[in-house]
Image (cartoon, grey):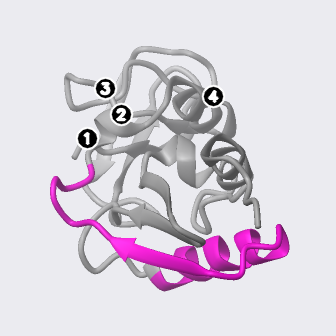
């Protein structure tokens, strides 16, 4: 029996949205670490964004559902904790999707480069914690709008 190529499986996984930020795929989030066939068993390695992430079980279920919908019957999900996930693994496409959605993508300087709403640069952090633990709440002094900043991890 032939099975889909690894590239095809990656394409399918790129269609699975993150349950907390549905404008970004699990692939663009960088948490899908490996896809490989071992005989007729598909192995998918997943690294959670942080230990204790409340979305981990939903993410695993979404991966299983998506792959089973494409006819994958033998599937093993593997949690890969080392190396730990980092925002460096976000793709450029994922960062652009975050910003278009109104979430400032992570920046090497540890704070947003600009307001995702108006592009302004006069920004202030209002809370270290945003709508999820991986985000902080910021406000733009130019447009006065609050926004989430995806923290560097």
Cα gap from disc 4 to disc 3, whole angstroms: 16 Å
Cα gap from disc 4 to disc 1, whole angstroms: 20 Å
Q: Which mark is residue 117?
A: 4
Q: Kindly identify the residue that appears in the image at 39 percent across and 44 percent down.
A: 150
Give the label, 4 or 2, closer to the camera.
Answer: 2
* Segment tinted magenta in the rendering: 57-85
The residue that mark 2 highlights is 106
Pointer 1 and pointer 2: residues touching (CB < 8 Å)? yes
Q: Kindly identify the residue that appears in the image at 28 percent across and 80 percent down.
A: 52
Q: Find numbered disc 1 in the image and state the secondary structure of the residue it sits on.
A: loop
Pointer 4 and pointer 3: residues touching (CB < 8 Å)? no
Q: Kindly identify the residue that appears in the image at 67 percent across and 52 percent down.
A: 9
Front residue of 23 and 77: 77
Q: Is residue 90 visible?
A: yes
Q: Is 29 a magenta residue?
A: no
Pointer 2 and pointer 3: residues touching (CB < 8 Å)? yes
Q: Which mark is residue 152?
A: 1
Cα gap from disc 2 to disc 3, whole angstroms: 4 Å
Q: Residues within 10 Å of mark 1 (few under 14, many from 20)?
A: some
Q: Is residue 65 left or right of residue 45?
A: right
Front residue of 136 and 42: 42
Count up the numbered dots: 4
Cα gap from disc 3 to disc 1, whole angstroms: 7 Å
Pointer 3 and pointer 1: residues touching (CB < 8 Å)? yes
Q: Residues within 10 Å of mark 2 (few under 14, many from 20)?
A: many
Q: Find numbered disc 4 in the image and state the secondary structure of the residue it sits on.
A: loop
Q: Which mark is residue 107?
A: 3
Q: Kindly identify the residue that appears in the image at 24 percent across and 74 percent down.
A: 51
Residue 106, located in which quarter of the rendered image? Answer: top left
């Amino acid at each position: 029996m032939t099975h889909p190529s690894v590239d095809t499986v990656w394409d399918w996984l790129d269609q699975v949205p993150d349950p907390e930020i549905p404008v970004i795929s699990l692939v663009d989030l960088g948490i899908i670490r490996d896809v490989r066939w071992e005989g007729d068993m598909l192995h998918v390695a997943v690294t959670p964004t942080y230990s204790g992430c409340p979305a981990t079980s939903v993410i695993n279920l979404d991966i299983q559902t998506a792959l089973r919908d494409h006819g994958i019957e033998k599937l093993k999900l593997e949690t890969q904790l080392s190396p730990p996930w980092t925002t460096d693994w976000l793709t450029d496409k994922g960062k652009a999707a975050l910003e278009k959605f109104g979430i400032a993508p992570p920046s090497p300087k540890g704070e947003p480069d600009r307001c995702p709403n108006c592009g302004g640069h006069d920004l202030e952090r209002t809370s270290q914690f945003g709508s999820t633990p991986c985000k902080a709440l910021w406000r733009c002094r130019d447009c006065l709008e609050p926004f989430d900043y995806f923290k560097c991890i």
